[in-house]
Amino acid sequence: MSLRLSPGALTVLERRYLKKDESGRVVETPEEMFRRVAANIAQAEALFGSPGSARGIEEEFFRMMSSLEFLPNSPTLMNAGRRLQQLAACFVLPVEDSLDAIFTSVKNTALIHQSGGGTGFSFSRLRPSDDIVSSTGGLASGPVSFMRVFNSTTEAIKQGGTRRGANMGVLRVDHPDILRFITVKEDPSEFTNFNLSVAVTDEFMKALEEDSHYSLVNPRTGTPSGKLKAREVFQIMAQSAWHSGEPGVLFIDRIERANPTPRLGRFEATNPCGEQPLLSYEPCNLGSINLGIMVREDRGGWSFDWERLSRVVALAVRFLDNVIEMSKYPTAEIDAMAKGNRKTGLGVMGFADLLVRLRIRYGGPESLLFAEELMKFISEKAWETSRALASERGPFPNIRGSVFDSPGVLPVRNATVTTIAPTGTLSIIAGCSSGIEPFFSLSFIRQVLNGVRIPEVNPLVAEVSKEEGFYNEGLIEHISRGGDIRDRDEVPERIKDIFVTAYEIPPEEHIKMQAAFQRFTDNAVSKTINLPPEAAVEDVREAYLAAWRLGCKGITVYRSGTRAEQVLTCKSPLYC
């Protein structure tokens, strides 16, 4: 079969995913990569008593990936059927309050990054700076100091020989070192391999609403160690995010209320992009459906193909469950948690493409209703498949004491089934918009691996203009130079409206979209709230509050131009 891959997709695949020989020469085609992955993941069928079906399932997996309907997370594409065979994308490791435990986690971090995974940590258990160290009589250096060890380790390890690892560092808002943590990345040379998030508690939000103080707690003793005014801390968080894009916010108590296995522990941290809360030693494997092609021709236009989506969801859930079995995990503790909870995270990409094909404006009321309906459908079909797999293969082993361990509740194969990931490189391979994000721009430069810059013009401009009968080369040239589609008289107003881009969408509409998907997503939703350069600190603050009000599990706000290297850079000078 002939794969339809863009130049950008081929660049990413050749640099990162395809097999290379000892001299670094690519020795695998994209089609062979998909075949390698499909054959490897289908082998799990034999483990559950159906070896005869493995060949047929392999063909279904291959067709689903090679047609770009669904792609698994990067480590699966990179490692399935190869020596590493580590297929999970993200992990959370514990950081306990002892030197031995800290450096055990450092070692495990190195192993995970070497295999292509990302790691999240909560540093909230570490005693604060200047606290007593009884074994030596000295003073503790605090969480931020130890985070530098993890950052340096990541810098030294290249994932699979192709990319540097990513980390999420989390600190509870009631940790005595919280102010130092919040502001540490205002120095751009600090923690270049970390995303940072503050774990915000319900108590803090209540104090914020009441304009009162809240207590700081020394994690070594569990006793109060002072008070801070919530509004002042909140303002510093907003100021820092305005300045540097970080920290993000995790509403940690809200996240914990959705914990499917509370008897096994509490959520303290997430994966590097924040969409996957995980227990200590827990991994998760992710995959995303390309919504942009879930359409069928309908009277000269497009309509959504619910039947096709249903088929892909069912097959993707089976694929991801197989991945759990086929993966070789970095440590025995991770292996036990992976197979005990069997968490998967099926998500989506190409949502902005889909809205354009359906002629719906991103962020408008119709798009929000459709997003909710869409994710509800995916969730219901995914859980239906997980229940069928439980009947076929057995429920996840840790189901006793979980939220599924109740009279009348059917057993499920997986503790979670859905996650909305950012799909950075996956969306390049699939040739679609990333995750549930709107278009960043209709013409932009995408910075991919090792500084490679790929110019891109949104192909939907040409597609829609041809369908609507106003296509001309002048329009495409205008867009490619960074021109605004709204400047073109031949483009109808209703078409200009559907090509809305990230900075043209009010922050509250971004957040409403995140909330719409979150209502039917088991884990969390990766979504960037883009702000233009002229946005004020108050805009960041209001975005945080809107996310809290609307039921999001966390939020990341990014004001354009606040980082030296952006993944996407628009050609128009307005927001560059």
Image: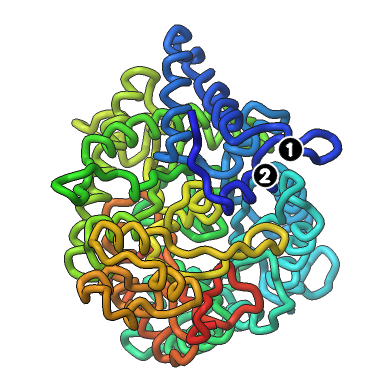
Q: Place residue 462 in its image quadrant.
A: bottom left
Callout 2, which amino acid? Glu
Residue placed at 43% from the left, 36% from the top? 67
Q: Which residue is mark 2?
A: 14
Query: Horizontal and vertical percent for residue 52?
Result: 44, 7
Q: Give the spatial CA distance, label 1 vs label 2.
A: 7 Å
Q: Mark number for residue 560?
A: none
Query: Horizontal and vertical percent for residue 160?
Result: 73, 44
Pointer 1 or 2: first along the chain: 2
Residue 225 in the image: above or below residue 37:
below
Q: Which quadrant of the figure contains the C terminus?
A: bottom right
Q: Which residue is mark 1?
A: 26
Query: Horizontal and vertical percent for residue 543?
Result: 37, 80
Q: Are marks 1 and 2 in contact (CB under 8 Å)?
A: yes
Number of numbered callouts drawn? 2
Instruction: Give the left or right position of residue 40, taking residue 437 as reference.
Output: right
Instruction: Give the left or right position of residue 189, taking residue 526 as reference.
Output: right
Closer-to-camera residue (464/143)? 464
Residue 186 in the image: above or below residue 10:
below
Element under disc 2:
helix
Residue placed at 54% from the left, 37% from the top? 337
